[in-house]
Image (cartoon, rainbow, N blue to C red):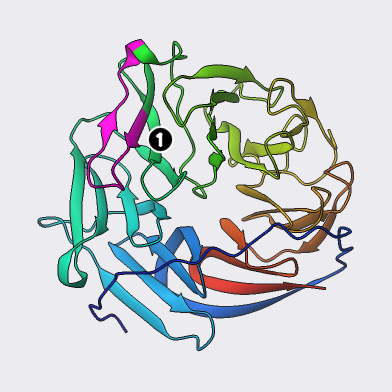
Amino acid sequence: MRTLFPFLLVVLLVSCSEKQKAPSFTSVAVQTVYEDSVSIRAIELMGNSLGYAGNNGVFGSIDLATGKVMESVQEYRDSLPEFRSIAHTSSDFFMLSIANPALLYKTGDKGRMQLVYKEEDENVFYDAMSFWNDKEGIAIGDSMNGCLSILITRDGGNTWEKIPCSELPEGVEGEGAFAASNTNIKVLGDKAWVATTKSRIYFSADKGKTWHIQKTPISSEAPTQGIFSVDFYNEKLGVAIGGDFTRPEINKANKAITEDGGKSWQLIADGQNPQYKSCIQFVPGSEGNGLVAIGFTGISYSNDRGLTWKSLSDEPFYTLRFFDSNTAYAAGKHRIAKLVFK
């Protein structure tokens, strides 16, 4: 059931600072907490709520204590936008649509969503967004006019400015990002890593003011290959994963790790599963040893920083967020589920 509702969300982020030995998961229990005819590729944990947005203009939140769903539909003129990117601050919720026109909304007055950025061009396509803090945020999209599309806000999301190509590294023809899980951006401290379809990473150490390129060994020979997801446990330890969604069985040159903040990357478990995945996340409190990767090919887990992996489930999902060291929420086609790792 869909009803309009006040969407002013006060966010309390779950701390992931606990230090402990990486758990050795052997199974995962999957409990569906939401079902509808919606494809969901973007979820965000916001205290004890889970925000989400998908196709057909649908967005909403789930109270994780009660399971109550509050949902609405955002229309734009005579169309229903498809949202694959969401983000939040301590007071506002944001969602960004793909394709033309690109529409970026934030929490507005009286619980309604307010359009704060619009971009019209036949080549526009935005893929992911995130916030460093309550004032500064970033959204990224496919290349236009010779460079990656990067939007920055410095005023809490009220206004957004597109970085001109003259202030960005030179683009590669056809370079973009995969709007598969809202995890091809990772922000940590003042830093940002943006992973692309050409298996390059745009890195900024100063909240998007300056950028340079980090190269990875992940394969990007075909337009359907590249990095789909990147995560960092701290400012040094990071992982990236991808593959080819049209040939999901490929498991060579599709996952890599860095221990120096992205200056150098090395392939891990090369030629071994997991194969194509659209999202990878460090397990909180695992000292960077625990990793979970998911996609429509199922759920895989490593407790040794990606050197070896085990398949825990064939259940298909697009994206994942950890609530604590044993619990996560995943979204995919027509559903959101609670995952309990044991």
Is 177 drawn above or below residue 289 in the view shown?
above
Which quadrant holds the C terminus? bottom right
Note whether residue 146 is visible: no
Is 135 drawn above or below residue 123 in the view shown?
below
Q: Is residue 322 magenta?
A: no
Say which amino acid is labelled 1. Answer: Ile
Q: Residue at x 33, y 44 (%)?
A: 98
Is 215 drawn above or below residue 237 in the view shown?
above
Q: Is residue 159 magenta?
A: yes
138 sits left or right of 295 in the view: left
Q: Residue at x 32, y 75 (%)?
A: 71
67 sits left or right of 73 in the view: right
Which quadrant holds the N terminus? bottom left
Residue that carries the numbered disc 1 in the rendered image: 140
The residue most toward the bottom is: 66
Front-lying residue, 330 or 151? 151
Q: Residue at x 25, y 53 (%)?
A: 105
Residue 26 horizontal/vertical position (percent): 88, 67
Residue 169 horizontal/vertical position (percent): 46, 13
Where are the magenta residues, as a range? 150-166
Q: Residue at x 26, y 48 (%)?
A: 104
Residue 28 horizontal/vertical position (percent): 77, 71
Residue 97 horizontal/vertical position (percent): 31, 48
39 sits left or right of 320 in the view: left
Tag 1 secondary structure: strand
Note whether residue 172 is visible: yes
